[in-house]
Amino acid sequence: MTRPHLRQSVAAAAIVIALATGTSACSTGTPIDNIVEGLVQQGVDQLVGGIDEQIRGLVDDVLGGVELTGDGEVPASFPAEVPLTGAVLGGGAGPEGSGWVVRTQLDGGLGFADAAAALEQAGFTASGVSSDATSGYGAYSGAAYRVDLSVATDGEGVVTATYVVTPR
């Protein structure tokens, strides 16, 4: 990989992490939030899809503890008390437990209501919830974490959930 391409990859990683962290702090469930969340997820998808293990190590060194996954696993530090619905596609973790983003695919007719119900059954309280037949958004507060949940259906009918988790 050439040095300019490496710099672009590292810069893209920094932007993705900053956007993910920033949207978790100010989400209100407006259409702008959904657009920003979508852009963040696209950045994560592009970044994770194109980074090999050497670059992952470099990103970790440069950004001070950032962890990225794209192998169907949540980041190692992801809090176990936050339930996820669907098959994990990948995610990221900020340094020192500052926050996490995980994306899942919901199959078998699962949607926003199912993912929201799992959070509520785990003791999280909903606020700012807005949903329809194909998408939804809600902020969920628990004793230790806040979860911003976004669920969307793409043009091919694939339903994905994005969880942005921050400590309270």
Image (cartoon, rainbow, N blue to C red):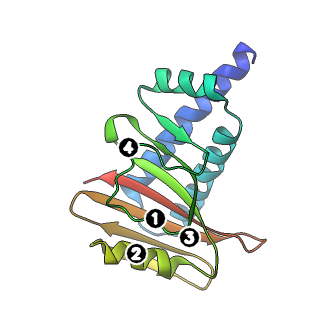
C-alpha distance separating marks 1 and 2: 8 Å
Asked if the residues shown at circle 2 and circle 3 are in contact, with their CB atoms under 8 angstroms apart, the answer is no
C-alpha distance separating marks 1 and 3: 12 Å
Residue in the image at 46% along x and 44% along y: 75
Asked if the residues shown at circle 1 and circle 3 are in contact, with their CB atoms under 8 angstroms apart, the answer is no
In the figure, 7 relative to 145: above or below? above
Residue with the mark numbered 3? 151
Residue with the mark numbered 2? 118
Amino acid identity at mark 3: Val
Dividing the picture into quadrants, the one containing residue 125 is: bottom left
First in sequence, mark 1 or 2: give its number: 1
First in sequence, mark 1 or 3: give its number: 1
First in sequence, mark 1 or 4: give its number: 4
> Please, what secondary structure does the residue beneath circle 3 have?
strand
Residue toward you, 26 or 65: 65
In this view, the mark in front (4 or 3): 4
First in sequence, mark 4 or 2: give its number: 4
> Please, what secondary structure does the residue beneath circle 4 have?
loop
Q: Horizontal and vertical percent for residue 40? A: 58, 50
What label sits on residue 84 in the rendered view?
1
Amino acid identity at mark 2: Ala
Residue toward you, 148 or 128: 148
Residue with the mark numbered 4? 77
Asked if the residues shown at circle 4 and circle 3 are in contact, with their CB atoms under 8 angstroms apart, the answer is no
Asked if the residues shown at circle 4 and circle 2 are in contact, with their CB atoms under 8 angstroms apart, the answer is no
* Quadrant in the picture for the C terminus: bottom left
Residue toward you, 53 or 102: 53
Q: Residue furthest bottom?
A: 133
C-alpha distance separating marks 4 and 3: 23 Å
* Quadrant in the picture for the N terminus: top right
C-alpha distance separating marks 2 and 3: 14 Å
